[in-house]
Image (cartoon, rainbow, N blue to C red):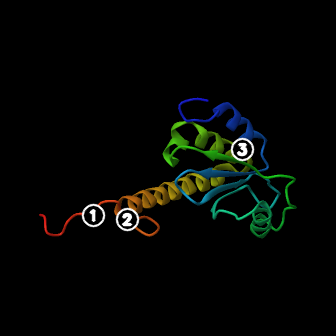
Amino acid sequence: MDEYGVDLDEIGRVIDAAEVLVVRFQVVEARLLLDFRTSPGEGPLVKIVPRAGSVEERFRSLKKLRPAFPLPDRILSFLWPRGVLALEESGVLGRLERRLGELGGAAAQTACAETYDELRREESAMLVAAIRGGDGFQTLWQRDPEID
């Protein structure tokens, strides 16, 4: 383990070996789905997906997203225990982008960067909601309107 709370070498091995990978986050409910499988007409897929209620549900949703491909034998997954920004700082994002680029070229790398930006915005919105007591959160202290 290192400063990120995970074994980055092991995560690198998972990224290199996975056909399909799901990255789960501490703060963000959404998941990062990476399907590295390709065919002559279709490149790899990188997409933000909702949390699945079960493994079977994840396989069904993958089949809907990628109907041209057979179901994989397994879907690998890991929990990223830090914020989304740390995915980039740790080099994990770069490793994902490199693998996608090897399989799908610049378009796949661009899709990865755009998806990462979307995850950052989602995490930021979640943190603002937590601070302000937004939907799904409750504030512990409120300003007294009588005091200025």
Amino acid type for the residue under numbered disc 2: Gly
Q: Position of residue 52 (x, y in %)?
A: 69, 63
**Upstream in the sequence, badge 2 or badge 1?**
2
Residue marked by disc 3: 102
Tell whether 85 sits left or right of 60: left
Residue marked by disc 2: 133
**Upstream in the sequence, badge 2 or badge 3?**
3
Q: CA distance from mark 3 to mark 1?
A: 52 Å
Amino acid type for the residue under numbered disc 1: Gln
Circle 1 residues within 10 Å: few <14, some 14–19, many ≥20: few
Q: Are marks 2 and 3 in contact (CB under 8 Å)?
A: no
Viewport quadrant of the C terminus: bottom left
Tell whether 65 sits left or right of 72: left
Viewport quadrant of the N terminus: top right
Q: Nearer the viewer, residue 14 or 135?
A: 135
Above or below residue 91? Residue 118 is: below
Amino acid type for the residue under numbered disc 3: Glu
Quadrant assignment, res 16: top right
Residue at 46 percent across and 58 percent down: it is 121
Q: Position of residue 135 (x, y in %)?
A: 44, 70
| Residue found farthest to the left | 148
Q: Position of residue 103 (x, y in %)?
A: 74, 48
Q: Secondary structure beneath disc 1?
A: loop
Looking at the image, is mark 3 or mark 1 nearer the viewer? 1
Q: CA distance from mark 2 to mark 1?
A: 10 Å
**Upstream in the sequence, badge 3 or badge 1?**
3
Residue marked by disc 1: 142
Above or below residue 2? Residue 37 is: below
Looking at the image, is mark 2 or mark 3 nearer the viewer? 2
Q: Nearer the viewer, residue 62 or 115?
A: 62
